Amino acid sequence: MNEQFERLMARAESLITRIESVLPQPLSAPDWTASVAYRYRKRSSGHGALEPVKHIGSMRLTDLKEINDQKEKIRRNTEQFVNGKPANNVLLTGARGTGKSSLIKACLNEYAPRGLRLIEVDKVDLTDLPDIVDVVSGLPEKFVIFCDDLSFEEGEPGYKALKSILDGSVAAATPNVLIYATSNRRHLLPEYMTENLTYTHSEDGEVHPGEVVEEKISLSERFGLWVSFYPFSQDEYLSIVAQWLSSFGIDAQAIAAARPASLVWALERGSRSGRVAYQFARDYAGQNSELQGL
C-alpha cells in the first residue's frame, strides 16, 4: 500500500512540475554585471528572459559622420538622462541606413561607464514591457529600452502596450527607464488614402473620420523627442566612405582612388546610405589588405 502511495505521489509531483513549467513565470533579473546590453527573448515555453549580449559593437559617436545635428540631440538627451535630469523618450525616423540604430549603440558605448544600460526588445514582445520595467525599476543604473525598426500593422497588441508605457498608464513613469525607437515611418502605423475622409464620405464610413487619423499619430506623439534622418548627398556619402576606409587603415591616396568604385557600389544598390558606405569600405579594405601593411 505504501509503495502504491509513493508511486502515486511521485507521478503527482512530476505532473505538477510539468504544469508549472508551462505556467507564466515572473521575469527574473539577470546578472547585471555580465554586460551593459541585454536582449529580451521569449522561450518556446512562453517564458521571457533577459540575456546578456556578449559581443557589443565598438561603434563610437566620433565614427558617425554627416549626422551632427541628430547626434547632438541624442547625446544631449542621453547626457541629461544619465545625470538624473529630466529627459525624453526618443523616436528616430527617416531614411534607411543613415545611422539611426548606430547612433543609439554609440551612445551606449559612450555612457556605459557612467551607468547607462541597454535592453533590446522586439516589437512582438512589447506586451511584456511592464514586466521588464518592474525588473529594472529601483536599480541605480539608467536603462534605455531599444526597439529597432519599429512599425505596426493594424491590431497588433504591442501598439497599445507601447502607448501605455510611454504616456497613459495609471502607473507613474520610472525615472531610470527611457525608450529609444527607430523606424522608417514617423507615425509607426500604415496610412491609407481612404482614411483622408475630410472631403469624401461614404454611407458606411466613420462618423468622426478625423479620429482615425488622430489614432494613427497618437503613438508617435508620445515620444518627447523626434529626430529625423535624411538621405545623404553624394559628397556626404563619399565623406562617410572616406571615414570608414580610414578606420580600416587605408591611406589618403588609396581613399581618393577608391572614390569611383564607391560610387558604382552605391549605384548598384540604389542607395547612398551610411550602411552602404560601411559595406563598401569593408569590401574594399578586405580586397586591398596590402594597403594596410597586413
Image (cartoon, helix red, strand yellow):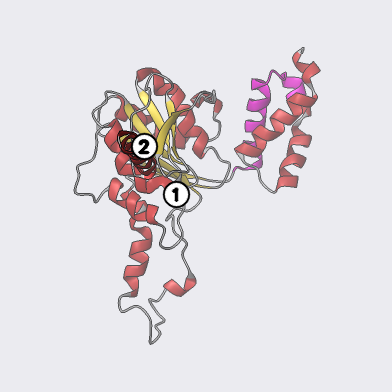
**Residue 284 lies in what quarter of the image?**
top right
Between the C-alphas of marks 1 and 2, the distance is 43 Å
**Residue 66 lies in what quarter of the image?**
top right
Kind of residue at badge 2: Arg
Q: Residue at x 41, y 81 (%)?
A: 200
Kind of residue at badge 1: Val
> Does residue 93 lie above or below 2 as drawn?
below
Please identify the dominant SS of the magenta region. Answer: helix
Identify which residue, 3 or 164, lies in the foreground: 3
Is 141 left, or right, of 120 in this rendering? left
Say whether disc 1 or disc 2 marks the residue closer to the N-terminus: 2
Picture coordinates of residue 94, whole percent (x, y): 51, 48
The residue range painted magenta reads 232-255
Q: Residues within 10 Å of mark 2 (few under 14, many from 20)?
A: few
**Residue 254 lies in what quarter of the image?**
top right
Q: Residue at x 31, y 50 (%)?
A: 222
Q: Residue at x 33, y 29 (%)?
A: 29
Mark 1 or 2, closer to the camera: 2
In the picture, the disc for residue 124 is 1
Q: In this rendering, does residue 203 appear at all?
A: yes
Secondary element under disc 2, as helix, strand or loop, is: helix
Picture coordinates of residue 256, whole percent (x, y): 75, 27
Which residue is the extreme one toward the front? 1
Location of the N terminus by quadrant is top left
Q: In this rendering, does residue 88 appear at all?
A: no
Which residue is the extreme one toward the bottom? 203
Is 181 left, or right, of 65 in this rendering? left
In the picture, the disc for residue 7 is 2
